[in-house]
Image (cartoon, rainbow, N blue to C red):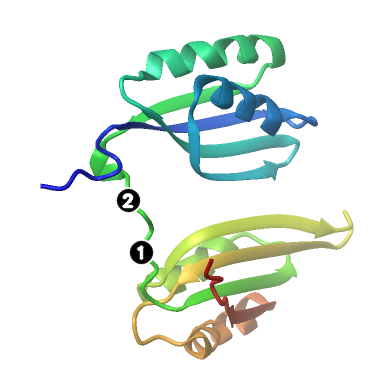
Amino acid sequence: MSTSRTDNLAHFAVTVISKDRPGIVADISEVLYRLGCNIEDSSCTMLGGDFAIILIVSHEKPFTKARLTDEFRELQEQTGLVTNIRSLHEDEICAVKEEGELCLVSVYGSDQPGIVYRVTRELADRQVNITDLNTRLIGTKEEPVYVLMLEAILPEGMAVEEVERLLDSLKKELNVEISARAITPVSL
């Protein structure tokens, strides 16, 4: 019987939120490096004046959530950042299977309630799996422009052109610009 790579690894989801400042990522990655953790996956963004990052980290067993929490405690006290650490069970650790075509959808328009909901509902109803989503308010105070960017995996048999057609009615209804394009994955 073969042993999977995850059998001897403890995995954790680490979430950190902090007022933005230079050096947050360096501080977080230093703690993980000192412990010997491997950053397997991560995503970070600015939300208003706050910085948020989510990481999936691993460490050879035996290694505990308590040890990880203790190591972040000093950084929390020094900088005021807030961490949340969750142990992941083996069935929660899997590579993302990107079976369909990858697609980037962008939406630009006047800021109004419902843009994210309406676009994502339209995609969800057609089994489009959203893998990344970012929104931002740009422009001026007098003329704010809402920007929504999302990456998605299209279900087998759906083409990017179909996504543009199905979102076409929302363009008119919400008075926004919507475009979709294929994302070509890069093989190493």
Task: Work out whether 45 lies above or below 161.
Answer: above
Residue at position x 42%, y 76% in the image = 154
Query: Percent x, y for residue 29?
Result: 61, 30
* Mark 1 vs 2: CB contact within 8 A: yes
Per the model, the C-alpha gap separating discs 1 and 2 is 9 Å
Residue at position x 70%, y 11% in the image = 78
Q: What residue would you read off at disc 1?
A: 97
Query: Percent x, y for residue 132?
Result: 53, 58
Q: What residue would you read off at disc 2?
A: 94
Query: Percent x, y for residue 67?
Result: 43, 13
Name the element at disc 1.
loop
Residue at position x 36%, y 28% in the image = 60
Q: Quadrant of residue 182?
A: bottom right
Please state which of residues 100 and 63 is positioned toward the viewer in this rendering: 63
Name the element at disc 2.
loop
Position of 164 with respect to 8 (left or right) is right
Residue type of the residue flagged with mark 1: Lys
